[in-house]
Every structure is written in structure tokens, then in C-alpha cells.
Amino acid sequence: MRWVSLRLSLLAVLLAWPVAACTAATASPQAATGNAKAFDAAFQKLNGPAFLDVPSATIEAEFVRLRSLLPANDPARDIHFRSVFCNSLQWKDAHRGRDYSKTAVQLAHSAGDVASEARARLCLATYIMLLDGSQQGLPEIDTAIHLLKEHQEPQLLAEALEMRGDLLSLLGEQAKAMLDFQRARTAFRRAGITQEVNPLMFSMAVAYRRMGDWDRAASYFTAAQQRARAIGDTEAEATNLLQLGFLRLETSAPDKALSAFSQAVSIAQQHADTSSVNAARTGIAEAQILLGKPDAALSTLQQARTGYLADQDNSSNDMLLLLTGRALAAKGQYAQALQRYQQALPLIQANGNERYLAQLHQAQASSEEALGQPAAALQDFKKFHALQMKLRSKMQLEQNQMMAFEDAIRRTDFENRQLRAQAEVRQQELKALERVRHWQWLAIVLALLLLALLCSMAWRQWQRSKKLQDLTLQDPLTGIANRLGIEREVVRALTSAQREHSPMSLLMLDLDRFKSINDRFGHAAGDQVLRDVTRAWQTQLRNRDPLGRVGGEEFIVVCLDADLNKALAVAERLREATQALHFDGIERGLRVSVSIGAAQVLADGESSDALIQRADRALYRAKHNGGNRIEY
């Protein structure tokens, strides 16, 4: 079933094979002659560990061979064949593929063949997602998993869990996705597959990307791309280039994203891989928008739309509409952009993708503001802000759960190694000391109890130390880094920037006339203002840009990989976000503003204190010139 989850993780589109081949396949797939024993062996191999990580062309060739071995008038093996052949790339017509899969499900269910029914349901889910949207395929996958939990098919269960994890990850549910990936890993172990399954590791890397752990994801995709290139697996190479492109978009590097997507298109076109071509063109269009090339983006989107239409894939209609709106807005055609956003809204809501929904509300607010519709713009901005806060909280929770999953994996592997070693030692001792067996067992039990006690004590001590360390580096009021914590981040970032010769900038922020708020309304009101302001700033910062409070109403932001121009753009977003806040709960009409000083690292050897002092002097100029401004 590996080809199912691979196609799902790429928002799969069926490749262009002749319709005549599909029509022939819809008939009962029986060969004139066949060999039952050879068929069973080939079927077992196709669904075994050997085919967990192979290119689609290899699987397609195995389908042809399996069909030639299928005995005539053999209903049981006919059901087996249908349960895998429904995944064939020959299904150009997705409606025919869906109907064929439904028949395979019904036949397997009537025969009581649970494994074949589960395979056919996973296949059916793929076509439903292509035709009706990603989320609509989830019930079929859930049903397949439910069937397999009571059936001794651990590898198939692992593949079904991985497929559901891929879909949940696509829909923004990274914590649930990682839980499925962990369960899939366990099921693979139960199936006797002790090595790591590369496609599962790939799925986990995609989840890392979507939850903001970009360094780890980039490391995996780059290494996987090199392996794919070394063995000539162009399908995997295109897949990794796509993921690298999306990662570069999310890390504000549209030029690098454009390069990765363009390479993916070139490779995919050489092998008629239309699914990768369409996905890469969608990414190219977004990169072109970010690079200020809306006309080129509209042309690219039209190419992608034509490709998706030819492949009968409706799963990306929402993103195509959203990107078209953004391109039109970049051309100043705000009314037309709003029309596209309104068309995209119900599709995004139907798929339940909150990441896309947040992007839509942000884009819509910008166009409404440009058209002189402040009330509508404010409503959309509020929806965007609420979704951003929700997604940020979810991302933090997911990252914590990810750490727990990884710790569980390491702990389980360590415990398994320990148990194996202990078993070997006990066996040797029992053979040598048969007469004192009773005392040997007692010694082992005591040793295990002592080990458990020591592990428990060490774990509690580690927890206490970690909690104390976190408290010493965290501001208790706002939850962000305190002076010690942010100064450590400045030193760490400066050292990295000087070592790698990359740009880095620093922002010093100070709330204007904050003392008057404390004097007029009390320190509780002032604390509330500080908390609300820091939350608003966090929505405007990249997840990897540290924010810290150095005292009172003064803050520092470290802008990684950012020259002065990029830092000034960040500062302007922070200044606007501050002005947009309302504190009617304290006093109707109460607003705050912020003064910001910016400084970029000038040369190797500059100390963190010197950099902070330059930013502080710029902040002083901003305050001296009236506040609510940025100086550098």
C-alpha cells in the first residue's frame, strides 16, 4: 500500500495513461491462464516489506505481472487482485477508479476478506480526496483502521495509520498526525520490520516542516534528496524538491523556493509525473507573488489549473483561488481579488484547513482596506489574529508532544536494548550456575528494582532541574524570555551570524508613556497591557526570532538571517500591530504605541553589548523624536 500514502502526501494526482487501458481494466481482471501458487507468492511480495520504499514504475510493473498470473474463475484471488490494482496509475479517469474501488470494497466485504476490504477502502479514500477534497477521504481511512485493529495484519495497519497521519498533517493536525506515525512505527515493529521505513520518516519530516521545526525538516529533505539522486529515484527526488520548496516559502526565502520548484518541474516533466508538476507550479506561483511578479504568477496558476483539471483533481481548488486572489491584489485589482477569496472560503472551510483559512482572512483584510472598507477589513483581521493565536498555541503544543514522542522512541529503544542484554546475561548465568538458580533470580529482581529506583530518582531530578532552568530564563509576567534569557539568545545569534557570515539585526522596543498607564489605572492594568502587546508581537514574528523583556516596558527582538531592511520591515509590523490594539476593558479608547530602535551587526568581532548599545541609542532617538516611530 506504499503507493497510496506516497500519492496522498503529494496531494496525488493520477498520471496520464491511455483511457483505453483503463476501460480494459474495469472488466473482471482475469487472465486466460494463471498460476495460483505463483500469484500468491507475487501478491505476498507486493504487500510485504520489500515494496515499502520503491518507485511507482516498479509497482506498476508488478501489477502487470500479477495480472498475468491470476487464475481464471478464482473469486478469492480476484478479490485480492482488485484490492491492489485499484491503486494502478492506469486510472486516468478518477471517477472510474472510484467506482472500481467501490466494487472491490463490496466484493471483499461480502467474502469476509478483511485485509482486502481495508486495502480497497484506502484506495477508495484516495479517489474521494481527488474528487471531493482532502478531508472527505478520512472516513474511509478510519474504517480501514478499525477493521485492521482486530485483524493480524500489522504492516497493513501501519500503512493505514501512516496514510491517515499524512492526511491529518495536511489538514494542520500535527499532534494527531504524529500520534498516528508513532503507532505506525510500533505496528511496523510488530510486523518484524526493525529498520526505519523511509516513507514514514519522510512523512514525519513533513510534519516537522508544518509545525515550524524547519532546521530538522530541511536536514532530512536534503539528505533524502541526495540519496534519491544517488540511486536514480527521480520520483523521490522530485518529492523532496517539492518539500524543500514549501519549506523555503515558509522561511521567507521565495527565491530559493522558486529554484527548488523549478527543478521539481523539470524532473517531473521528464517522467510524465503530472502530480508533481501541478504541485510545483502552485508553489512557483506563490514564490512569484512574494517576489513581486503577479503577472507571472497568474500565468503559472493558469498552467497549474489546467493540469489539475486534466487529472480530474479538485483537491487544490481552494489554494488555486486563494493564490489567484493574492496575485490580483498585488496588481491592485482588489475587487477581483475579493471575488476569488469568496469563492475559496467555502472550499477551505469544507476541508477544515485553518492554516489556509488564516491566510485567506489576512489577504481579504488587506484588499478590503485598500477598497476603503475598514469595518470589513477589521473583522477579517480579527479572524486572522484569532486563528494565528490558535495556530501558534497548537504549534507549541504539537512541538511539546513531538518531544514527548521522540523521548518515548529513544526510551523504548534503550529499554529494548537493555532487556536484550540482560536476557543474554541471565541465560549464560543460569547455564553456569544451575545449582544456585534461586539466588540468581533474586539478585536479578533486586538489581531491576534498584535500577528502577535510580531511574525514577534521576528522572525526577532532571525534571526539577529543567523546571528551575526554565524559570530562570523566563519572564513570569509575559511568558517570554527575561533579560538573562534574551541576552543569551543575542550572544548565541551573534556568534552564529559571525561564524556563518550571515546578516543579523536587533530591535529595541519601548512602550511610549507607559508610566502614565500604571499611574492612572494601576499596575494590574499595566501588566495586562504588557501581556496583550507581547502576544500581538508574537503573531508578527517568525517562530525562530527570539523576543525577550529586559525590564519594565522595554523589549528586545533578535532578527535572525535579516539585514537592516528586513529588520525595519519587521519593526514596522510590530509598530502597526501595537497601534491596532484596543484596551477598552481598561478605558474606552485607550491605545498604546511603541518606539523602536534597530541595528544590524556591522562586522566580525562586534560584541553583543556593543550591538545592544547601538540599538538602544537608536531607540533613544525614536523616543526623543516624539515616539511611535522607528530609528536606526
Image (tube, rainbow, N blue to C red):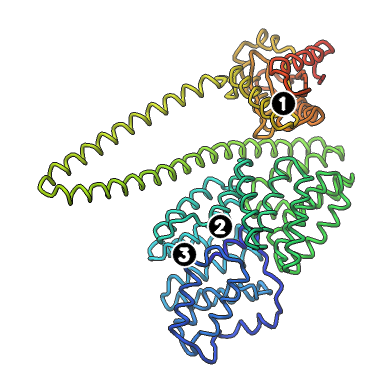
Image coordinates of residue 425 in percent, x first then y, are: 26, 47
Q: Nearer the viewer, residue 482 or 504?
A: 504
Task: Give, as a three-letter code, the residue at label 3.
Answer: Leu
Q: Is residue 76 depicted above or below 364 in this figure?
A: below
Q: Is residue 430 above or below residue 136?
A: above
Q: Is residue 478 left or right of residue 619?
A: left
- Residue 498 versus residue 369 in the image, above or below: above
Is residue 106 shown above or below 171? Answer: below
Answer left or right for 308 relative to 426: right
Going by the numbered disc 2, the residue's amino acid type is Pro
Q: Residues within 10 Å of mark 2 (few under 14, many from 20)?
A: some
Is tag 2's residue or tag 1's residue first in the polypeptide sequence? 2
Say which mark, if any, is on residue 199.
2
Amino acid type for the residue under numbered disc 1 = Leu
- Calculate the distance from the C-alpha at mark 2 to the C-alpha at mark 3: 14 Å
Residue behind mark 3: 156
Q: According to the image, label 1 marks what residue? A: 581
Circle 2 sits in a helix, a strand or a loop, which is it? helix
Spatial separation of the CA atoms under disc 2 and disc 1: 45 Å
The residue sitting at the front extreme is 432
Residue at the extreme bottom: 32
